[in-house]
Image (cartoon, rainbow, N blue to C red):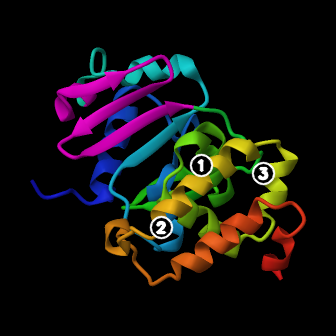
């Protein structure tokens, strides 16, 4: 089945949130698709919604939410997230606090006003919550944000969000996979030099040298 446009999934997610009587101050739009909205650098097909109040999550479960049950018969529910599966796409509702202190930005998407996480916050969550399973697209995302926000590493380090040992170990693994990488698999929207991307990311992990790339 053909993939749905991400805005279609976002509208479905908003329907579920509204069914649960959550207003736009209760959640934010984040993840890779939110970054795509900012920078149009690659395609992303899933939708991630973040909540800070864990007590709200249960309201979004297909067990209790008629709209969620209507759009997804297959789902995963854990204490800190609910994943709605729609064929080969997903809507994730995730409990996670703001890590950077950067306030979400209000935007209008398909005539609906919502709050979207700042790019630095999106990358912070990627690096903080799953450093051991970072993917090449996460490396690309981090460098893309850095190019648009040169103080990215200052923000991450100030808030103690980098487990550099784990990230470096994972990065070494990804570097070995680079030679077998097919760029078309990454669904990029604009050309990149993958070696340059890897070089910049590696320098970002070096406290003494990352600043030279921000000049």
Which is more N-terminal, label 1 or label 3?
3
Q: Is residue 17 visible?
A: yes
> At 78% from the left edge and 51% from the top edge, which residue is drawn?
156
User: Which residue of the protein is positioned furthest toward the left in this rendering?
Assistant: 1
Which residue bears the numbered disc 3? 156
Circle 1: element type: helix
Q: Earlier in the sequence, mark 3 or mark 2?
A: 3
Point 63% across, 59% down: residue: 119
Magenta stretch in the rendered image: 68-95
Seen at 20% across and 28% down, the residue is 74
Q: Which mark is residue 210?
A: none
Q: CA distance from mark 2 to mark 1?
A: 13 Å
Q: Which mark is residue 178?
A: 2
Q: Is residue 79 magenta?
A: yes
* Side of 159 where 86 appears, left or right: left
Classed neighbour count for the residue bearing mark 2: other residues with Cα under 10 Å, few (<14), some (14–19), many (≥20): some
Earlier sequence position, callout 2 versus callout 1: 1
> In the rendered image, which residue does mark 1 sit on?
170
């Amino acid at each position: 089945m053909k993939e749905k446009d991400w805005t279609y999934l976002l509208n479905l997610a908003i329907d579920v949130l509204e069914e649960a009587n959550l207003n736009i101050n209760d959640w934010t739009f984040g993840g890779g698709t939110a970054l795509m909205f900012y920078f149009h650098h690659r395609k992303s097909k899933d939708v991630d919604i973040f909540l800070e109040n864990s007590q709200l999550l249960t309201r979004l479960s297909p067990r209790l939410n008629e709209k969620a049950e209507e759009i997804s018969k297959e789902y995963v529910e854990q204490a800190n997230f609910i994943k709605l599966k729609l064929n080969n796409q997903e809507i994730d509702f995730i409990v996670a606090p703001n890590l950077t202190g950067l306030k979400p930005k209000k935007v209008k998407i398909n005539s609906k006003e919502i709050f979207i996480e700042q790019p630095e916050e999106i990358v912070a969550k990627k690096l903080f919550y799953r450093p051991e399973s970072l993917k090449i697209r996460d490396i690309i995302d981090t460098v893309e944000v850095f190019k648009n926000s040169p103080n990215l590493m200052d923000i991450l380090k100030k808030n103690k969000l980098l487990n550099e040992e784990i990230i470096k170990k994972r990065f070494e693994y990804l570097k070995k996979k680079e030679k077998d990488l097919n760029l078309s698999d990454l669904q990029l929207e604009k050309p990149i030099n993958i070696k340059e991307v890897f070089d910049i990311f590696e320098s970002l992990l070096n406290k003494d040298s990352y600043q030279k790339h921000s000049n």
